[in-house]
Amino acid sequence: MSTIRLPGLQTGIDTNALIEQLMAIERRTLNVWENRKAVWQERQEALSTLESKLRNLRTSVRALSDADELRAFNVSTSDEEIITAEATNNAFEGNHTVVINQLANAERWVHRTGHKYAEDYVGTGTFVYSYNYKETSITTTATTTLQDLVGLINNDANNPGVTAGLLHYDDAYHLVLNGEDAGTDYQIHVNTGSTEVWKSGSAFTYDNDNALLSTKIKDLDQFSGTLSDSDEYEEYIEIKNCTDHFGVSTAQVDFYVNENTTLGHLISEINDAFDGRAKAVFENGKIVLTDSVGGESSLWIELGWNDDGGGTLLDGLAMSVTTEGNATEASLSGYTASAFTKSQTAQDSKIKVDGFPDTSATSEVQTVSLSGGPDGGSFTLTYRGETTSDIAYNATAEEIKTALELLSTVNSGDITVSGSIDDGTTFTFANSLGNVDLLMINSSLTNGGSPLTASISETTPGSDSYISRSSNTVDDVISGVTLHLHDTTSANGEDITLTRDVQSVKDKLDAMVIAYNAAISHIKETTGYNEITQVGGILMGDYVVSTIQYQFRGPLIEQAAGFLEDVDSFLTPLNIGLEFDKDGILSLDTNDFDEAIAEDYRGVLALIGADKTGSSTSDTIEFYSASTNYTTGGEYNVQVTVSGGVITSSQIKLSTESTYRDMTISSNIITGNSSFDDNGDPVYAEDGLQLSVDLTTDGDYTATVYVKQGFAGKIEDKIDRMLKATVGSIIVDQDHVEDQIELLQDKIEDEEYRLEQREKRLVLRFARLEKALTLIQNQMAAASIIAISS
């Protein structure tokens, strides 16, 4: 507004007061707009508060809307210093006894000689080491210090999982190599040269992306044709022409493939064939086979597909050398394997659960086969990547045993040796070792100057009668339970007890009750009429808001969708203790709830959070699956016709509807109509519902299909629709209010501009009036003076 004012000192007229009174009359329209805007802003604030309360309610019901997730357990152990545990919803109530025979360890190597100072130079050369069958090399220069070497190892981009450090002992600094993971798969090897590696020539793919271990072979892009489901053809992969590091052959394995065979199964078969003499893994869609011993190698593998005349094909099985053995030679002086002490050996944890395995331990037996009696030459034995010194052809069993026990991978008493090499030496492993890797033999044995062929085979598999895992955290032995092993136990073990965590369900229901009452109270306050003040709520008359309480009350008093009397233990929330008082306030009767839980635990959870689970009255038409997001819970009538072993007609409707709709047919699966409206919501209740049909016998079939949805999920669905971006009823309501506020603001700004111009005109008009009056007054005063003087 203008700030120009006319004091009227000369005329005696209060011009400002006149202008203010005139402008007050002019502002009546502006006041109307501002008052209306204030009302709409109150509505906006009320809707914003309601949205917040609805979101809180949705959070609380979402925590209840999946019956599987509601299953929770309290876990206790008899000695938490030895074992602790935690459970997921996949666990089961009960007790378990766990015997811990040994804990898993990570491997640790210490350089024995060391250096006087950490700043001493280590020399020029290459240090080659591997971990978990992955190898890397470190190159040093004349100015590389021991401390630098630690940094080079730790900062190496190809570091396979080893942490280097320094140990100050006996007035020297010693390089320490620590494996980052526990278990026998995670051994450290200091190699004399690079280890040979074979890889697939190209990656196996599924839908043009790299395949996974879980990918079925029949689903690979490289597979063509159809696997036979009869005994007429038996397709298989040949694992053939395999030799180990020293060129000793492995028997061919024919690995038969069926509908469920995965790449993971193939990897397991390759590892079984090599039995520790090489390790196969699957990386970036490729099979990778790594030798167990570094240096020049005779490792070899071929994979072939045999369709047995069935007309199928699997491409991509060709493998070749990608890293030659000893392509990089370890040349760093003083850092060979013999310069290190293995201060801790990688080992698996070993446990029994509830007395399983219940078999006794079995010692593994391996036997040497020789093509003739030797009269010259020598041989070496390799076990877990370490090789003995040369052993004479006529060495005694005791001498062979002594040579093995010089390896860091063999402890005294691990292996009993019987018979000399020409008698077919037998190696018997301690039964506590279980199923061990196969020994490798490298032979220069001769008879009459002619070379002899030597090999070693497993004649008795070993078993230590324990479950082994390469970690002290075990999550795949007791369903839904993760064990944390801290120490070994006695033969009696320690107890683990799982009990239902009913309190967590109560707590979630209490949270829902609080959030529900908060939302409903706000709705009542803003839409009701206060008889005392005789004033209606700010949202009174808002249809969207006033109907919400009835939408939410329905699922809490009605029979839950898809639940049946005489089949399900509970049909309504009232059956488990949820009830309303006369004012519509929701509460949970904990006594009723406890009784219901005691009667049927799963029945209570289903009533709360059944998530589109289903059943059918027909053995021919069966429930297959339903969409959590799109299928409506309820009772459906289905009609199907099977003719000539195929579905010729399939229709569905809700039991409350009169008209059937066609379903989509795909082989023996029929799917509900998946049309969506402009808001992205399903047009029909059966959207996403899938049923399977038995095509064995032709005929016309009918079924009643029940899709269960708990009351929490139904409330969640209603809130989701209300708060759906751009199209939700609350969002649309808020947008309408926002539009009204913007419209009123535009009118206010226009009116303020008009008033500002009007005030300016009034100021100018009164300024002219005062000027004229002042002139007249001056003239009259002058006339009076003249009259007096005359």
Image (cartoon, helix red, strand yellow):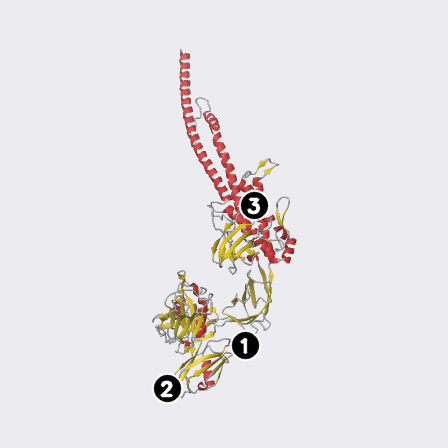
Q: Which residue is mark 3?
A: 551
As drawn, is 567 to the left or to the right of 756?
right
**Secondary structure found at label 2:** strand
Q: Which residue is mark 2?
A: 450
Tell me if residue 667 comes above or below residue 291 in the rendering. Answer: above
**Secondary structure found at label 3:** helix
- Label drawn at residue 361: 1
Q: Mark 1 belongs to which amino acid?
A: Ala
- Residues marked 1 and 3 touching at CB (< 8 Å): no
- Label drawn at residue 103: none
The span from disc 2 to disc 3 (Cα, nearest Å) is 94 Å
Residue at the spot 49% in from the left edge and 36% down from the top edge? 37
Q: Quadrant of the N terminus?
A: top left
Q: Quadrant of the C terminus?
A: top left
Query: Visible in this render: residue 389?
Result: no
Label located before the other in sequence (1 or 3): 1
Label located before the other in sequence (2 or 3): 2
Q: Mark 3 belongs to which amino acid?
A: Gln
How far across and how far down the image is residue 758, in percent? 43, 28
How would you rate the neighbour count of disc 3 (Cα within 10 Å): few for under 14, some for 14-19, many for 20 or more? few
Residue at the spot 49% in from the left edge and 29% down from the top edge? 28
